[in-house]
Image (cartoon, grey):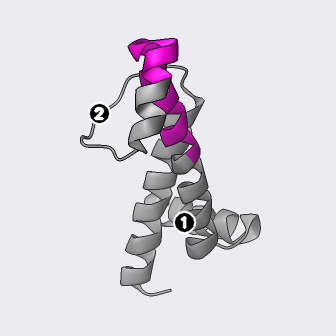
Amino acid sequence: MDEEEFQNKYMHLKILKNIQEYLKADTNAGAAVYPIRVPEDLLYHFAKTEGPESADKLIHRIFKAGLSAWSERMYQEVFGSQENLETFIELLKKKNRE
């Protein structure tokens, strides 16, 4: 594995770890990015029937579901398997000891 590939995988590993920690946390902490696109009728009707706070929670749940699916796809593209991930982590540990 050349240095460029190593750095690319390392960057993706850090992203995946951060996503994993975010998804495990039961908090609304984190940065907000606007605008978020959702079907107007969904947001309007949900806010009308459930209230604006519930609409905000719904958007957050949708975001977390999408983030989870996206991170799983990235994991598959970058590492492909648990064995490949473990091999890379061992390589990372070895490099850190040097």
Q: Quadrant of residue 90?
A: bottom right
| Residue 32 coordinates in the image, percent (x, y) | 28, 34
Q: Main secondary structure of the magenta part?
A: helix
Residue 44 quadrant: top left
Q: CA–CA distance between discs 1 and 2?
A: 21 Å
Crowding at label 1, few (<14), some or many (≥20) Cα neighbours within 10 Å? some
Q: Amino acid at mark 1?
A: Met
Q: Amino acid at mark 2?
A: Ala
Q: Check disc 1 and report the residue beneath it.
A: 74
Tag 2 residue: 31
Mark toward the start of the polypeptide (1 vs 2):
2
One can see residue 21 in this view? no
In this orientation, which residue lies closer to the viewer: 23 or 57? 57
Of 74 and 60, which appears nearest the observer? 60
Which residue is at 36% across, 82% downward?
4
Magenta extent: 46-65
Could you tell me which secondary element the residue under label 1 belongs to? helix
Give yes or no for contact between labels 1 and 2 (Cβ–Cβ under 8 Å). Answer: no
Residue 14 vs 84, above or below: the answer is: above
